[in-house]
Amino acid sequence: MSPKAASKRVPVAKTYKIYIGGKFPRTESGRYYTVTDKSGDVMANICQGSRKDFREAVVAARAAVPGWSSTSAYLRGQILYRIGEMLEGRRAQFIAELTSQGVASAAAEAEVSATIDRLIYYAGWADKYQQVFSSVNPVSSSHFNFSVLEATGVVAILAPEQSGLLGLISNIAPAIVGGNTCVVLGSESLPLCAISFAEVLESSDVPAGVVNILTGFKEELREHFASHMDVNAIVYCDDEQNSGAEIQQASAINIKRVISRVDRRWDDAENDNPYLISDTQETKTTWHPIGR
């Protein structure tokens, strides 16, 4: 092939699929949108997830709750650590994806490093947060009274728009380390790392359905995330056009917990915080008789 002919070759743009129940289906709607580089050239095709995709992701997440929530804290920590290991091995890919989406090279490298460190941080908390947040309560009768944390169930996450990787992981990690499963909508404008991260999950030890990742438009899917009756909590990170009020209102239908993480700097140390784990936990109080 002559150099002139080779220069006319059009690269094959990757189609980034969604991730549901440990598989990579295309969106049932058949829709997609394109992501372009600074020159306006198409880099990738991104699935535009639908309401049905979200419903199927919730079904997968709900099915995974019993197994994942009953997994030992030690094993959950080991699995998060393994995700960090896998991400470390693919640093170059994630840095390249961030830079191709307009993130400066130094900032992209720092974001990938911070993401790996955050996974390791939450892996370390897996078998410790119960000691911090649980308690033995004084009572006047002959009983022991214990308060312990339990996973709330299925958590829907609207990932931050301007942090395609670090913000995504900063919300997934504390949710799943506490035994929850989740359905996540990745950044609309910086979506590449979301599905690449799903590929990392697929090749690590995370059971199918624990993390489900969709791509698409928040404006279309936000209300469905908030109103779905089998979602126990929702986390949102942006408040475009007062969307937080819409989320609060729709979530009231089944009294799901609403967690606002608006206006955060995801590289700040405040996100290395066990309270992000307790955000999606329920406190269970048990009584045990003692003596006669």
Image: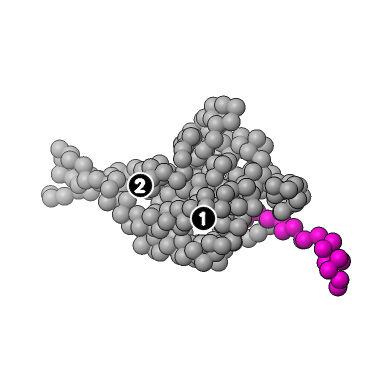
Q: Amino acid at mark 2?
A: Pro
Residue at 75% from the left image edge and 47% from the top image edge: 40
Which residue position is annotated with label 2? 274
Tell me the CA gap for discs 1 and 2. Answer: 25 Å
Q: Is residue 69 magenta?
A: no
Q: Amino acid at mark 1?
A: Glu
Out of 37 and 70, give the one closest to the viewer.
37
Instruction: Please provide the residue range marked out in magenta.
Output: 1-22
The picture places residue 134, in percent across and down from the top left corner, at: 28, 47
Residue at 60% from the left image edge and 57% from the top image edge: 96
Q: Is residue 5 magenta?
A: yes
The picture places residue 220, in percent across and down from the top left corner, at: 67, 37
Residue 118 in sight here: yes
Q: Secondary structure at mark 1?
A: helix
Q: Is residue 133 above or below residue 83?
A: above
Residue 126 in sight here: no
The picture places residue 235, in percent across and down from the top left corner, at: 50, 40
Which residue position is annotated with label 1? 109
Q: Nearer the viewer, mark 1 or mark 2?
A: 1
Q: Is residue 113 above or below residue 29?
A: below
In the rendered image, the residue lying farthest to the bottom is 1
- Direction from residue 100 to residue 69 in the image, left or right: left
